[in-house]
Image: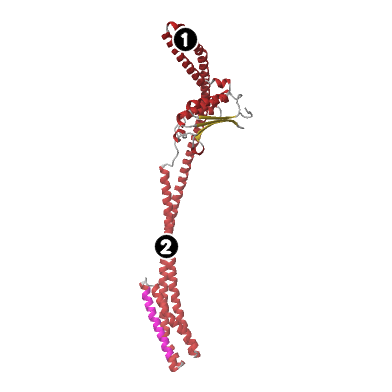
Amino acid sequence: MKKITSASLPGYVMVLFVICLMTFAATALTTYQNLQKLKQNNDEMEHSWRIKDHLKNINLLIMDAESSLRGYYISDDPLFLTPWKHAKDKLEAEFTTLETLTAGNPVQQTYLLQLRVLFDRKLKNFDETLALYHDGGLPEVVKIVRLGEGKEIMDEVRLVDTIMEKDELELLTARHNRFYIEFNRTLWIGNLISSIGLIILIIFYRLILNNFSKQRAVEHELKLTNENLESTVLARTRQLSILSRHLLKVSEEEKAKLARELHDEMGSALTVIGMTLSNVSAQLKDTAPVISNQLIRAKQALKDTVNLKRRIIEDLRPSMLDNLGLTASIESHCEHIAHVAGLTCETEIAEDFENIDPDWAIALFRIVQESLNNVIKYAHASHVKITLQRKAAGLWLQILDNGIGIPGDVLEKPKSHGLLGMRERMLLLGGSFTIQRGTGGKGTAVEAFIPFPPGIAI
């Protein structure tokens, strides 16, 4: 028979699987790096916009302060000085924030320093103008304004502010360009890796599919082989059962034939010998008493031989089973065993079972016979109970003793204590045979059951 081994994944399939995993891992890593760069670029863009926003805030604060002073000069209302005071308070915080934002850019730090100097000059100019207004009124303020010093400072402020914004835009543009170059390169590499991974995945799928197809073919072949093997085993089992049944039948027939021959031929011969010994012994009683006594002893030995012959015949084929039936045979054998072994033997059989199949009768009697022999040899029991009952589905036999119980290792050995023969007899009749410890783990219970044929109650 062809040897079939279970299919397993080839080595190259596992290699492709590992490569596929590495490819997708590389794609995931590349995507992660690209996202990190995108986040960094967004952070840098936000950083540049924050610088621009704070520069605009400073310009707005100066413009609000200038407008506040003009309103005050025209209306002489102190409420117009509120934006001016607010601007003075906020400008220092705005410059501090810009210093923090431009800490990594020395060029912007230089421009920021210039811008701060200009704003300090502008604030100083505001203070001087406000002092002149308080001393000389509006005409003095107009003279200062006509000099154009404040306008020159604001023009310089706008110039520095424009230069700082331009530098930030150039830096931002350079960062954008660098990002998109890296992004496109990463995108191409990612697409290439994904394409390779997809190809490897398709190849891997095809290999797995082919391997599973081969495995299914092997499993199908194995299934067919197992089915053929099971069919062969069943056929051989049926043949062996038929052969075993035939051998048991032949064995019983041979035993019956041998018992008849021993009874008819040997029995008559032993009877003639006994009669001859009696006659010769009587004739020599007076003339040769010594020889006569020897013949008497020989006749006694002959009687013992006749008794042995009877026991052998009963073991080969119980004559009572053929003459009086199963119930009488079991009860007689039970009484004999009780007398020989010195134990009490109880039978619970409610009917004679005269009409049952002879094969059933001999099988049940043999089981009783073998079980009682085991009780005598191994059980160390003082009481045995034999029960034979007619159930709705068949005949049920139980032999229960109060001995030491059957050891566990004996139950695992079907050939020990004649168990195989008893079980085989039941199986050949379509019945069942069990042996186990008795109730509460005491003694041994042997049970046999023979089912009635369908539609027939015996």
Q: Is residue 309 above or below residue 441?
A: above
Q: Tell me which colouring the rendered structure shows.
A: secondary structure
Residue extending farthest bottom = 136
Q: Inspect the magenta stretch and tell me whether residue 207 lies in it.
A: no
Identify the amino acid type marked 1. Leu
The part of the chain drawn in magenta is 108-131
Observer-nearest residue: 229 or 301? 301
Whether residue 75 appears in this view of the structure is yes
Residue 124 percent coordinates (x, y)? 40, 86
Location of mark 1 (residue): 277
- Between 235 and 428, the one lying in front of the other is 428
Q: Position of residue 53 (x, y in %)?
A: 45, 74
* Front: mark 1 or 2: 1
Residue position for label 2: 37
Q: Nearer the viewer, residue 38 or 313?
A: 313
Q: Write down the quadrant of residue 148 in the picture.
A: bottom left
Tell me if 335 is positioned left or right of 157 in this view: right
On whether residue 113 falls in the magenta region, the answer is yes
Q: Assign the magenta stretch its main secondary structure.
A: helix
**Distance Cα–Cα, label 1 vs label 2:** 129 Å
**How many other residues sit within 10 Å of disc 1, few (<14), some (14-19) or many (≥20)?**
many
